[in-house]
Amino acid sequence: MKIKKLLVANRGEIAVRVLRACRELGIATVAVFSEADREALHVQMADEAYPIGPAPATESYLVVDRLVQTARRAGADAVHPGYGFLSENPSFAEACAAAGLTFVGPPAAAMRRMGSKTAARQLARELGVPMVPGALEAVASDVEAARVAREIGYPVMLKAAMGGGGKGMRLVSREDDLTEALRAARAEAGAAFGDAAVYLERAVAEPRHVEIQILADAHDNVIHLGERECSIQRRHQKLIEECPSPLVDASLRARMGEAACRLARAAGYVNAGTVEFLVDAERNFYFLEMNTRLQVEHPVTEMVTGVDLVHEQLRIAAGAKLALTQSDVTWRGWAIECRINAEDPFAGWLPSPGTLTGLRAPSGPWVRDDSGAYEGYTVPRWYDTLISKLIVWGADREAACDRMARALAEYRVVGVRTTIPVLARVVAHPDFRAGRLSTGFLERVLPALRANESRVLPIALIAAVLAEYERGRHEAAAPPADTAPSAWRAAGIRGWSRP
Amino acid sequence: MEPPVKYVATVNDESRVVDVTGTDGRYRVAVGDDVWEVDARLAAQGIYSLLIDGVSYVADVTDRDGACVVEVGGEWYEITVEEQTRHIIRTRGGAAGGPRSRTLTAALPGKISRVAVGVGDAVRAGDTLVVIEAMKMENEFKATGPGTVAEVRVEAGQTVNAGDVLIVMA
């Protein structure tokens, strides 16, 4: 079987990523877009694009029937769900199958088994894969949550049963905060995943987040592509990821990889998937959950293994056997990814939607910018804040850190606040350089990262004053009102002309 | 040569007088007693290339609520720039900005998912006042200090714009 035409049931950078793979493989592409996304990059990059409803995701990107109908009308034979939205929703996988569409992801049954965090924990227990103590079921009520939390002991972590990406997650250190945390976690989970169920597990102190990438075909072959470390997080959402992990040696990699493959095989898993673990200071690892889809941070694995994960996903979905055996997988050098989000790190990571009036992405040797944006693009307030993923490769970790510092310094985004300044300071931080990471790292160092050394304050003052000076000169020389500028140029008329 | 335009640039509550002359990308900028010859070009909207004594800087300038945020050399500053005459009028008599405002305004557009307080409630620093849902996240807005709620201007489910007054404290 060959996939001829594929609908990408997603938006933003991941839709662009999938479209690129399709184009490389000669697969025709269909994009979908909400009313807020007509101008999005993925719409411009696809062969065809169709509207699927209003801006709220619940009325567009999460409407199963409309996506399936659009795929059929467009004559697509396959659907790639990306990450988030419906990617881990078994009903969507089933609806695609029922409509004769190849779903680029695991079978619905495997997704149910592993996509539900609580069912996955039950399976892990049967297989003897180590786990963080906690509930095997979602909590039905606040009263039950309080009882379970007392049983496993505070601090506890609330998690969305159907979730991922940190949405619907809350750390609770005392019973007084439980009710409000449950409410917020359920609201986020409901909005993001269409299922408000949450469960509890004990929070591990100073844990590191290490996950294993697996690939499985429909012919009982399962391999792992090593680990990614994703310990630099804010609000339980990953901000910096790397492959390999500074903590993991070949022996730990083999043991974690074996555990991940065992879980995937037992679940009847097919396609790309990620098994997440927490690793404590003594290098004990605990199964956390499985993400039954492509991960945001998949590029770091690609850079180090040389395997194009989206190509593999498409090949597997088309029924092909894995081209690689476990012994074919090798890891060369070091890759780091930084997430460029439209948010203000120093105002509680508040979203900062708006127009990217200026944008200049870095390039040069071993730099990859997986972006869903372009200069002049408006980041809609309806979806997540990810603008772009900046990925670099280096021969070793130090070289990769140096290259990331260089690339972040090149990255220019004007019009919205971004995570770039804080990313640059994390990458320069002695503890990060030394590989001393934990999921609490960022919140611990953030206040200190804020301080400016004021080395370049005079330069900043000069820039600010000159911008105002040129604005004043321009307004003084402004043309009469009846020669209104064209809307095409409205964003670019102030200040100096371009050289 | 035209007389310089005088500005007051304020950063971290510290104001400096800055004089500017020049045109077409060549400027003379005086910050206090320091004088700088600046070759400045707009490389892209909001992205400025500055050459000062042969040293090349790239500064990103974003307007935000009357102030601007400048990022340069891995540092960033919030700077308010106004012409000196306007600054003098505004601050005459030392009444800069008036008494400290006691309102909570929406820092971002979104939907009110919860109002945690009612009129007459006494709140302490850190208490949640309002929760706004935006970009798929629940964003909690907390009291910065103690006080009593005098007015609640929004209700759950309502859509708000950045800058809308949500809560007024007595």
Image: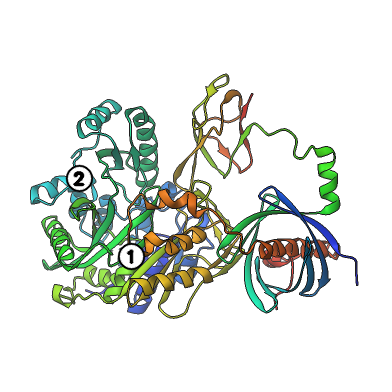
Task: Tell me the kind of residue under disc 2.
Answer: Val
The answer to whether residue A213 of the structure is visible from this angle is yes
Q: For this rendering, which residue is in front, A243 or B77?
A: B77
The residue indicated by pointer 1 is A242
Q: Secondary structure at mark 2?
A: loop
Residue at the (58%, 25%) spot, across then down: B147
Q: Residue at x 69, y 34 (%)?
A: B100
Residues tagged by mark 2 and mark 1 found on one chain of the structure:
yes
Q: Residues within 10 Å of mark 1 (few under 14, many from 20)?
A: many
**Quadrant location of the C terminus of chain A in the rendered image:** bottom right
Quarter assignment of residue A417 = bottom right
Distance from Cα at disc 2 to Cα at disc 1: 23 Å
Q: Please tell me whether residue A25 is drawn above or below residue A127 in the rendered image.
A: below
Sequence-first disc among 2 and 1? 2
**Is B120 above or below relative to B79?**
above
Left or right: residue B148 compared with residue A467: left
Q: Is residue A348 shown above or below B118?
A: below
Kindly identify which residue carries mark 2. A132
Question: Can residue A4 be seen from the camera position used here?
Answer: no
Amino acid marked by disc 1: Glu
* Side of A332 relative to B145 (left or right): left
